[in-house]
Image (cartoon, rainbow, N blue to C red):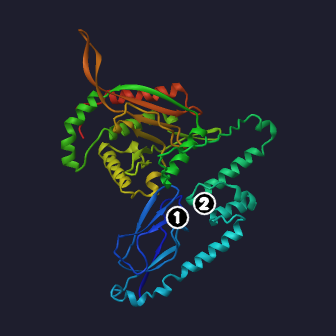
Amino acid sequence: MSTFDIIMPKLGESIQEATIIRWFKKVGDQIKEEESLLEIATDKVDSEIPSPVDGVVVKLLFDEGSVVPVGKIIAVVNTDENALENKNETLPNTAIIPELADKKIDKSIEKKDASTNDKFYSPLVKNIARQENLSLEQLDAISGTGYKGRVRKQDVLGFIQNKTVTEEPATKVQQKQNVSVSQPKVILNSGDQIIQMDRIRKLIAEHMVMSKHVAPHVSNFIEVDVTNLVLWRNKIKDTFQKREGQKITFMPVFIEAVANALRKYPGINASVDGDTIILRKNINIGIAVALPAGNLIVPVIKNADQKNLVGLTTDLNSLAELARKNKLSPDDIQGGTFTISNFGSFGNLTGTPIINQPQVAILATGTIEKKPAVIETPTGDVIAIRHKMILALTYDHRAIDGALAGGFLRFLADILEQFDMNRAI
């Protein structure tokens, strides 16, 4: 029997392991090349993994919910041409997946070795704990944010950082404000509906709460006359779609303008690390995308300042489509240095989004509306109908003051207001 080993793929430079969410095939099932075999979850994104070959599944080496290191064999496929005809003979039910039993025994032993309260810890987490001389009691006390409460690398590092802070000299500790926040108890009333958060919603909630705790948020607003931009898009959109095979929205122009503004104001394209500010060399702009399930994800357009409008439109449409189909890779949502959230797509005037850590700012784009405006002319002021929108910049006051934020927002508005109506594309 010719077989093919399917391994846990590497889904990004920083991804070392993934959790198996569900198997789409069971032992004995036929599978085609590029057909989805399983769904996995990382700390960044969920992904469906296709089979690289045709054949019949003969082994599934891990249960759903298992955390598997990158490079490990997770399934075996029989690739013989006659595999389908003989699958009932080659796959007796009594010995479908003998490795699973071994894995379960190993996991049980691992739990007993690593924890006093039956928690599971990955090899990476246990290695960090050993290097940092954490006791089993300390490891067990860490609240996990991973799948089913699993303790992740970030949880251990956060515990170590907090532990270091609490061990500082008293003079330093007294200068810090330790605020304890308790969530109010919720009382259920008759007829109330309880909806359990899915994994993505939990991650979003944790990330947003963390961001508000870490960074003091401030927002600036500016109204922008985008009449030139609206008239230009109306003029070229049909030609563009016929030539490029895709629609052009206002967002690629916003991305281009933001990239230009970030080049002029590098303090906005930054991160805060303790008492240092890191100015990012690359301009990688994330775009918040609403998923069909109601969650948000932020795919990233890398090196946005180096791309023209056609390139930005292509990247944006491609990432948005992958997001809606749950096909984004971890690399697609990593490395962002600035984020745009389009409140206008929901018909909202504007909004004050939460900063996407570890970035220091996020831009909200509002809906474009026709409004009466006073226009100065050589013969006096007149009232005319103009297309206007509101931009809102929310920023981290640790790194950005009002002058820097205001200058960035004004420069961005000027780019959009002075858009060339005769621009070729």
Residue 33, position as x, y percentages in the image: 34, 73
Q: What residue did someone put label 1 on?
A: 19
Mark 2 Cα shell of 10 Å, populated few (<14), some (14-19), many (≥20): some
Q: Residue 177, relative to residue 198: is it above or below? A: above
Residue 150 is tagged as 2
Judging depth in this view, the residue of 94 and 246 nearest the camera is 94
Residue at x 41%, y 28% (from the top left corner): 411
Residue 243: tell me if it is visible.
yes
Judging depth in this view, the residue of 243 and 173 nearest the camera is 173
Label 2 and label 1: CA atoms lie apart by 10 Å
Residue at x 36%, y 37% (from the top left corner): 254
From the viewer's perspective, is 210 left or right of 241? right
Tell me whether the residue at label 2 lies in contact with that at label 1, contact meaning CB atoms closer than 8 angstroms.
yes
- Quick one: quadrant of the N terminus? bottom left
Residue 260: tell me if it is visible.
no
Q: Amino acid at mark 1?
A: Thr
Residue 101, position as x, y percentages in the image: 57, 79
**Which SS class for mark 1?**
strand
**Which SS class for mark 2?**
loop
Q: Quadrant of residue 50?
A: bottom left
Judging depth in this view, the residue of 102 and 286 nearest the camera is 102
Judging depth in this view, the residue of 264 and 54 nearest the camera is 54
From the viewer's perspective, is 155 left or right of 82? right
Q: Amino acid at mark 2?
A: Arg
Residue 150, position as x, y percentages in the image: 60, 60
From the viewer's perspective, is 227 left or right of 53? left
Q: Residue 307, relative to residue 384: is it above or below? A: below
